[in-house]
Image (spheres, rainbow, N blue to C red):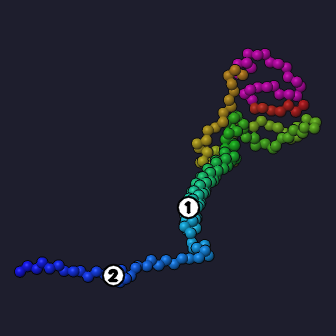
């Protein structure tokens, strides 16, 4: 059997359908002004990032300053050590032993006689002068000063005279000197003219 019957579908009337309403709350002008805007949020976030970057740069600058201070302190410490070493070397060179040894290398001799003075007002010699012995030394077994082992590496001063001066003096005739003055000899120790 066949069923060729048409089934009728019930039709709904438009009255039965309820329209969907879209409800929207409309805010007034004051409520719209009081809402946070995106500009304010961006300014706040941007300000926070600016503060973070400023703090980062400040910490970098402070750490660079700390490194430069540490470097300068190291340099100051090294210069202080160098100053101390040079001061000790200067004290060594200014010691009586070194001065006596250097004077002996220049030809000075030790005098064991009483001191003799020259009174400049009238040119009178006060005291009795006697020549010093050439064999006496200041620093040695017979000397008056204790030898210093630190002076072993210090070179002695030797009198240096340019060769041109020696040949000129040897070949030139002697010039008369003024009374009371000492003739100029490049090999002798310099002495002042008192009158």
The residue positioned 68% from the left and 25% from the top of the image is 162
- Under tag 2, what secondary structure? loop
Q: Nearer the viewer, mark 2 or mark 1?
A: 2
Residue 103 figure quarter:
top right
Q: Earlier in the sequence, mark 2 or mark 1?
A: 2
- Residue in the foreground of this view, choosing between 121 and 164: 164
Secondary structure mainly formed by the magenta segment: loop
Look at the image and tell me in which quarter the C terminus lies. Answer: top right
Residue 171 located left or right of residue 49: right
Can the viewer see residue 154? Answer: yes
Q: Is residue 178 magenta?
A: yes
Q: Is residue 154 shown above or below 28?
A: above
Query: Does residue 125 appear left or right of residue 59 in this picture?
Result: right
The spot of residue 46 in percent (x, y) is 56, 63
Secondary structure under tag 1 reads helix
Q: Is 55 above or below relative to 137?
A: below
- Label 2 CA crowd tier, 10 Å (few <14, some 14–19, many 20+): few
Residue holding disc 1: 53
Q: Say whether residue 195 is left or right of residue 98.
A: right
Q: In terms of depth relative to the viewer, which is nearer, 177 or 114? A: 177
Crowding near the residue tagged with mark 1, few <14, some 14–19, many ≥20 C-alpha atoms within 10 Å: few
For this orientation, the residue located farthest to the bottom is 16
Q: Which mark is residue 13?
A: 2
Picture coordinates of residue 113 (x, y %)? 78, 42
Q: Which residues are magenta?
A: 166-188
Specify whether residue 34 is painted magenta: no
Q: Please report the residue visible at 68 percent of the width from the left and 39 percent of the height from the top.
A: 102
Residue 133, image quadrant: top right
Q: Image height check: is 83 above or below 32?
A: above
Q: Position of residue 123 (x, y in %)?
A: 91, 35
- Asked whether the residues under the numbered discs 2 and 1 touch, taking CB atoms below 8 Å apart as contact, a structural biologist would say no
Most extreme residue toward the left is: 1
């Amino acid at each position: 059997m066949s069923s060729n019957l048409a089934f009728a579908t019930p039709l709904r009337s438009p009255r039965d359908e309820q329209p969907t309403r879209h409800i929207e709350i409309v805010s007034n002008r004051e409520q719209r002004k009081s809402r946070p805007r995106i500009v304010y949020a961006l300014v706040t976030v941007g300000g926070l990032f600016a503060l973070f970057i400023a703090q980062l740069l400040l910490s970098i600058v402070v750490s660079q300053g700390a490194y430069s201070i540490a470097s300068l302190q190291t340099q100051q410490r090294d210069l202080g050590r160098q100053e101390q070493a040079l001061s000790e070397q200067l004290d060594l060179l200014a010691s009586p032993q070194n001065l006596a040894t250097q004077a002996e290398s220049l030809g000075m001799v030790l005098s064991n006689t009483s001191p003799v003075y020259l009174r400049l007002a009238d040119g009178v010699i006060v005291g009795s002068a006697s020549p010093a012995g050439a064999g006496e030394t200041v620093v040695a077994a017979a000397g008056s000063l204790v030898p210093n082992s630190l002076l072993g590496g210090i070179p002695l001063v030797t009198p240096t005279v340019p060769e041109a001066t020696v040949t000129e003096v040897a070949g030139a005739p002697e010039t008369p000197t003024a009374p009371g003055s000492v003739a100029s000899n490049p090999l002798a120790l310099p002495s002042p003219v008192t009158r």
